[in-house]
Image (cartoon, rainbow, N blue to C red):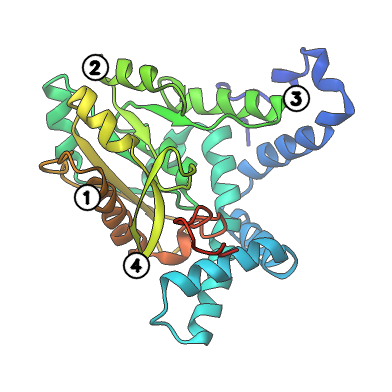
Amino acid sequence: MTPDPECESPMTEHASDTRFLHPRYWSAWLAIGAMYAGAWLPWRVKMTLGKGIGLLAWRFARRRRHITETNIRLCFPELEAAQQRKLVKDTFLANGMGILETATGWCRDPEHLRHRVVFEGQEHMARLQTEGQGALIIGIHFSTLDLGGALHSLFFPADAVYRPHDNALFERFMTRARLRIFGSTIDRHDLRGVVRHLKAGHNVWYSPDQDFGREASVFAPFFGVEAATVRLTAKIARMTGAPVIPLIFHRDTDDKTYRLEYLPPLEDFPSGDEHADAARINAVIEAAIRRHPEQYLWLHRRFKTRPEGEPKLY
């Protein structure tokens, strides 16, 4: 199998910068090499290996398992204890597969996956494209997030808001990989950049479903739990007039096909009430997660920031 010419080996792509030869970057080199190699495995092998990675993490990553167990207990109180335990384990398996899916999205031309995609709701985006209007695309932190971005690029262009990685080598690798998928990348703190791109008619992919701290957030219900929810979604929509379109993407149960679905643009959004707007975004995300809850990134501390006077949950 011959590698895509558009995706040269990361070893040659980054090694010319001698600072990355320092031992502090050796673990990043190992991770990049492993991702590049994993991206080229046969699909069935890739998914089996991903499940194995997830199983190992479920057994030995006790801190992450505690976080996941806490999230599942809080968000699915209607499930019996055995069902909650199964969902925790399935979450690790799905996120293990997500590592190999991310590698595939970053290191290979997404065109080779076109036959694996079912895309619904394209008419919502097509209409906006015809009108020359950019959309604020609400992505969600499923295990398939980065592969979903690669698959999305087969149909519509977009720029992506992202959080820079702390490791400079991995940041370079990650950014260059995403620039093969997206038109450009925008630091999550660069509000002016987001506004500028939307006003220029670009689509911007933005994921508001993580805890960014008290100052940037209001508290709104998420699976019945008050969660710090960023104000920025409504603020961007108000500043730009851009329609807000949720994008749902899942791995099908056969572990080899994917479903992407655009929902219609949110009506009467923003409303002017930041709490109501935050609650609405959370409700849309929650409904999407409930379709395949094991594929969500329950491994992160979604409820890290608590209202005044409430104890920590993790």
Q: Quadrant of the C terminus?
A: bottom right
Task: Please tell me which residue lies in front, 102 or 165.
Answer: 165
Marks 3, 4: nearer the viewer: 4
Tag 4: residue type?
Answer: Gly
Tally of numbered discs: 4
Nearer the N terminus, badge 4 or badge 2? 2
Judging by the rendered image, the residue that carries numbered circle 1 is: 276
Judging by the rendered image, the residue that carries numbered circle 3 is: 11
21 is higher (above) or lower (below) than 36: above
Which residue is at a point 27% across and 57% down the rendered structure image? 283
Nearer the N terminus, badge 3 or badge 1? 3
Circle 2 Cα neighbour tier, 10 Å, few/some/many (<14 / 14–19 / ≥20): some
Dot 3: what SS? helix
User: Answer yes or no: do the residues labelled 3 and 4 have beta carbons within 8 Å?
Assistant: no
112 is higher (above) or lower (below) than 239: below
Judging by the rendered image, the residue that carries numbered circle 2 is: 199
Marks 3, 1: nearer the viewer: 1
Nearer the N terminus, badge 1 or badge 4? 4
Marks 2, 3: nearer the viewer: 2
Dot 1: what SS? helix
Residue 150: image location, x then y, percent = 44, 36
Q: Quadrant of the N terminus?
A: top right
